[in-house]
Image (spheres, rainbow, N blue to C red):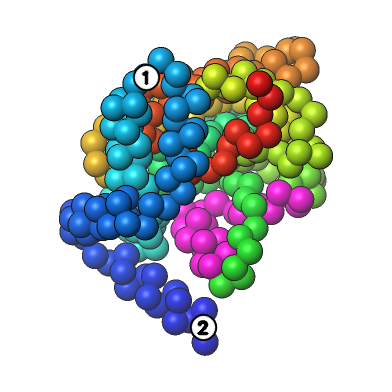
Amino acid sequence: MKYFLLKTIWKSFSYIPLPFMYFLADLFFYPFYYLVRYRRKIVRKNLTESFPDKNIDEIIKIEKKFYRYFLDIFLETNKIATISNKRMMCRMKFINIESVNNSISVGKHVSLYLGHFGNWEWISSIYLHLSNDVAGGQIYKKINNKLFNRLMLENRSRFGVENIEKKETLRWLYEKIQNKKIITVGYIADQSPKKSESNYFIPFLNHYVPVFTGTEKITKKFGTDAYYIDIKRVKRGYYEADLIKMHENPQSLPDFELTGIYFKYLEESIRKQPELYLWSHNRFKNARK
């Protein structure tokens, strides 16, 4: 009953037209930024440390843009519940999608690298553009609230993608391969490992951060093609995602080099549109000086 009520409210709200949603976001920005002050200390600290060349006025300008975008992306995530395939394909365009489909057509599995940048939730709509016989998956970390976790899993599967809990990744991959499926999996690869799991560090946004290397290991193990998704916000509610092949032969690279390529691409994306990164995440808590 609780889930039915939550889902009904979530879905009902998603029928509101996006222009009116953005009007609400503009109204909520002022109390959200000035009164609620959600994680303001973490956001300010992350921005200041990541962009030491910027003065405080420039930092605050990015900060305010981030909080405006933070509200937008929450509403855009809600919109997934009811938006049509046609409307989604209009609002989230994929550049160079033919390259991924070419990889699939010759029997290559595909790893899609992305970060908490731009509208990563709408990226699941990529499966509307791929071959019908591909097994599409996205790795997720379980949300503590069981009701909201169930809601988000249902929301994220709207466009035909399967949600794979992180610990089940290898089992899912082997199962699909045994069934002779071509696999395309999205990995949000900029998560911060626990301190006890921080074994490999890399330069990123003026920090030296611990990173997960599991995506690279999977990519090499299964002979997978690797693409970075460079998301650009064209205007409010409209995005372009450029699919960049990271290397012609990832399996030939030394250990961790593919991970390094990914973080270089991600940093370039962030520096172009810094307000689109998830600065409220305590990404640098285990960084080395």
Q: Nearer the viewer, mark 1 or mark 2?
A: 1
Q: Which corner quadrant of the image does residue 262 belong to?
A: top right
Residue 192 in percent (x, y) is at: 65, 38
Q: Which mark is residue 122?
A: none
Q: Amino acid at mark 2?
A: Lys
Range drawn in magenta: 148-168
In the displayed structure, 47 sits above or below 87; it is above
**Mark 1 to mark 2: distance in Å?**
47 Å
**Which residue is tagged 1?**
54
Residue 239 seen by the camera: no
Q: Which quadrant holds the C terminus?
A: top right
Residue 185 seen by the camera: yes
Residue 40 in percent (x, y) is at: 42, 45
Q: Which corner quadrant of the image does residue 134 belong to?
A: top right
Residue at 34% across / 45% down in the picture?
67
Q: Is residue 73 left or right of 154 when viewed as pictured? A: left
Residue 154 part of the magenta-drawn span: yes
**Which residue is tagged 2?**
2
Residue at 53% across / 35% down in the picture?
115
